[in-house]
Amino acid sequence: MWRILQVIVLLVYSSVSYGSPFNRHAPLAVVFDHTGQLRESYDYIIAGGGTSGLVVANRLTENPRISVLVIERGYLDGQENGTSVPGLSVPTKYVRTDTSVPQKGLNNRTAPLYTGDVVGGGTVVNGMFFARGAAADYDAWEQLGNPGWGWDGLLPYFKKSETFTPPTAEIDDMFPGVISLDLEPHGLDGPVGSSFSNCQYPVIENFYAGWKSIGVAINPQPNNGEATGAFYSTMSAYAKNQSRAHASNAYYRPIAGARRNLHLIAGHSVSKINFGEKNRAVSVDFMSGTTNETSTVKADCEVILAAGAFRTPQILQLSGVGPEPLLSSLGIKTVVHLPGVGSNFQDQPTLYMQFRYGNYTFPTPDWIFSNASWAAEQLDIYYKNRTGIMTIPYLGGSTVAFLPLQNVTSDYQSLITSTSVNPSSLFPPSTHPSIIAGYIAQTELLRSIYLSSHTAVAEIAWEGGDTVPLAMIRPSSRGSININTTNPTSPPVIDFNTFSHPIDIAIAIASVKKIREWASSPPMRALGTIETFPGANVSSVAQIEQAIRNAATSSWQHPTSTTAMMKREWGGVVDAELRVYGTQGLRVVDAGVFPMSVAGHSSSSVYAVAEKAADIIKAAWI
Ligand SMILES: Cc1cc2nc3c(=O)[nH]c(=O)nc-3n(C[C@H](O)[C@H](O)[C@H](O)COP(=O)(O)OP(=O)(O)OC[C@H]3O[C@@H](n4cnc5c(N)ncnc54)[C@H](O)[C@@H]3O)c2cc1C
Ligand SMILES: *[C@@H]1O[C@H](CO)[C@@H](O)[C@H](O)[C@H]1NC(C)=O
Ligand SMILES: *[C@@H]1O[C@H](CO)[C@@H](O)[C@H](O)[C@H]1NC(C)=O
Ligand SMILES: *[C@@H]1O[C@H](CO)[C@@H](O)[C@H](O)[C@H]1NC(C)=O
Ligand SMILES: *[C@@H]1O[C@H](CO)[C@@H](O)[C@H](O)[C@H]1NC(C)=O
Ligand SMILES: *[C@@H]1O[C@H](CO)[C@@H](O)[C@H](O)[C@H]1NC(C)=O
Ligand SMILES: *[C@@H]1O[C@H](CO)[C@@H](O)[C@H](O)[C@H]1NC(C)=O
Ligand SMILES: *[C@@H]1O[C@H](CO)[C@@H](O)[C@H](O)[C@H]1NC(C)=O
Ligand SMILES: *[C@@H]1O[C@H](CO)[C@@H](O)[C@H](O)[C@H]1NC(C)=O
Ligand SMILES: *[C@@H]1O[C@H](CO)[C@@H](O)[C@H](O)[C@H]1NC(C)=O
Ligand SMILES: *[C@@H]1O[C@H](CO)[C@@H](O)[C@H](O)[C@H]1NC(C)=O
């Protein structure tokens, strides 16, 4: 039945979303590719039709009197199987790769930053891991001066964004006690599907047994604010058809044919916000990605920035909102001297350890690459039945351990004290004092987070194959995203500043040792587990440190915090209503507003933040 529905749904989409003829007064929220199709002004202009932008666009246009234009650099995805089948890699044309400057902490290697370049943004191309952070992580946001942004304030919005479906009986039976069937912390009728792959590799059982044997708790309910221990994560997929849920099919396509008050122009990038009296955002300039032709469109109420943590600071800086010394060095007239724009950049450095197994129960995840007949068989089962290995996210899986620092090492208190540094020493001497003040406020919270048993510092994932990613999810290091040219088509300079704070490398070293303890636990030994990278000969602390610096990457694909929601005197960029300081009619709603990263993956938090942002913006609409 669902397959028939799907065909109908696809037909409806393709007739309304594509090939719509030129029409100034186009009644539908179709994708435009030509500026002549737009109105002169809209109530709200949203820069970026990615994850957060589409949530806000959808919620605002629930009111038919509110008109919204979304301007998105990428194009609508073609609904290729690669964007919906969890086990397939997504088409590379939707992923953008940028490169950082050399990272001192990585022995001067550079690191890539991947972002979604498509309507729907990161969620169209991401790994579909869909667990929330810990309550303590969001409570820290609130403690940084943002009333209403703690766990209790955000939980209703996590729920509003999702439709959760518990695991199948088969999965539940496969891992008894590993997955809670409790619906309580979940939403049951939101746009984003949240569910479980309905198949798993049998050896995953050894992952749980291994952690359990070395004292790590199995956590059946990681979505109620206690996101620690070894757990089986929800993924962003619709349970019924086991296909990817992303912002475009959750928040855009269902209304694309119906709302006259929503326009979306694809293939265009916002290059500048124009300000009127009293620094009110009155219009934006935007450029065609094919011809570079620039147009202007007016905002009657507000401009909303949703270009992501990588690109929103660039738009602000190009518009004269940012650190005055940087702006004047590039000849940009300062509208608001706001030193925090582009600072406080956070991502989660990751080391990919490698193992092989001498006594493995087949099949292994590597068969997808090495056994063509098996891969084809599995795809066929998926298309016919929506079961099998292709329901597991590509190179992903959902089996993880999230470890608090005290569960990484019993020496955690001395690890904290021995790595303490003067916060100012981590920043260049010219750094604005407000940024250092905000960082000091964060480090005080980070200290209690590092001491807490209720939030994690390290994430270890295993899909049953050779690679075991280790992500340092609570970094103390802070990087930056800054422009170095007034040309809007040049990407801003990415500096992760990975491992600049000594606690980050110390946690990484301790985590590698912890993974080794897990890999040599009896349940993992029974698989004949052998570490191939860094390898048994890399054993002293100094050797492990060098292996990490020579091989880790800066990003776990969760860039955040470059336009932080914090007090202005703490280097914040937006207030607790997401308004950019010193301006009127200008907000930011993307992952850049997270004051600190959360001990989890970012997409579920981006959805929740954007849902809450939409409520705030609607309440202010007059
Ligand atoms: C490869 C990858 C894997 C990931 N894996 C996971 C995972 O497994 N689980 C998880 O929870 N999270 C994951 N994430 C992260 C998650 O998807 C992001 O945190 C989230 O999508 C960010 O939402 P956003 O709205 O802040 O930005 P985005 O979704 O990136 O949206 C920003 C949009 O703005 C557009 N844009 C940029 N500049 C301009 C401009 N100047 N004008 C107009 N438009 C512009 C971009 O094209 C993009 O569509 C992953 C991300 C990537 C890239
Ligand atoms: C795409 O998916 C459909 C089923 O949804 C399947 O019939 C078709 O063969 C797939 N296409 C490719 C190229 O694999
Ligand atoms: C990294 O580069 C800096 C500056 O060029 C240099 O001083 C340092 O020795 C380099 N470090 C390594 C490990 O190569
Ligand atoms: C961490 O260790 C403590 C004490 O040993 C234990 O009680 C707790 O369950 C562990 N937490 C996790 C997530 O494993
Ligand atoms: C799966 O189901 C969801 C929700 O019904 C729908 O939006 C989506 O388009 C479907 N995906 C596919 C590939 O069938
Ligand atoms: C658009 O601008 C970029 C950068 O300035 C340039 O490389 C490119 O050739 C331009 N494209 C067109 C069509 O003019
Ligand atoms: C490949 O997969 C098939 C099942 O499709 C299996 O019978 C065969 O043993 C596998 N071959 C190898 C080399 O693993
Ligand atoms: C098809 O799905 C059903 C349950 O959804 C399952 O019992 C059956 O084994 C599946 N068939 C194949 C070939 O995987
Ligand atoms: C900006 O920085 C990038 C990355 O370091 C560099 O490649 C580029 O040449 C710089 N551009 C200018 C105009 O300085
Ligand atoms: C290999 O795995 C089997 C089944 O899990 C187990 O019975 C056996 O003891 C293992 N062999 C070794 C050498 O660990
Ligand atoms: C460990 O052994 C590998 C492979 O034999 C070698 O490439 C590597 O340099 C060795 N590392 C150290 C620290 O000795």
Image (tube, rainbow, N blue to C red):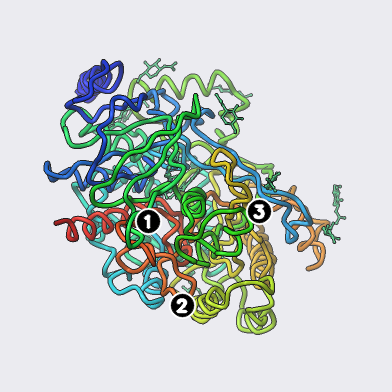
* Left or right side of 44 for 96: right
- Say which amino acid is labelled 1: Val
Circle 3: residue type: Leu
| Amino acid of disc 2 | Glu
Residue farthest to the front?
Answer: 277
Give coordinates of residue 113: x percent, y percent. 59, 46
| Residue that badge 1 annotates | 588
Label 2 secondary element: helix
- Marks 1/2: CA–CA distance: 18 Å
Q: Earlier in the sequence, mark 1 or mark 2?
A: 2
Between 207 and 108, the residue placed more toward the observer is: 108
- Where disc 1 sits, the SS reads strand
Q: Which mark is residue 351?
A: 3
Residue 295 location (% of width, % of height)? 39, 34
Mark 2 and mark 3 residues within 8 Å of each other at the beta carbon: no
Q: Residue 490 at what x, y percent from top left?
A: 59, 40
Quadrant including the C terminus: bottom left
The residue under label 2 is 569
Q: Residues within 10 Å of mark 3 (few under 14, many from 20)?
A: many
- The span from disc 2 to disc 3 (Cα, nearest Å) is 35 Å
Q: Nearer the viewer, mark 3 or mark 1?
A: 1
Q: Is mark 3 within 8 Å of ligand 11?
A: no
Indicate the quadrant where residue 510 lies: bottom right
Rendered view: 518 above or below 530: below
Closest to the camera, between mark 2 and mark 3, is 2
Marks 3/1: CA–CA distance: 31 Å
x, y percentage for residue 173? 35, 47
Q: Is residue 223 left or right of residue 161?
A: right
**Residue 155 to residue 14: above or below:** below
Q: Earlier in the sequence, mark 2 or mark 3?
A: 3
Q: Can residue 168 be seen by looking at this rendering?
A: no
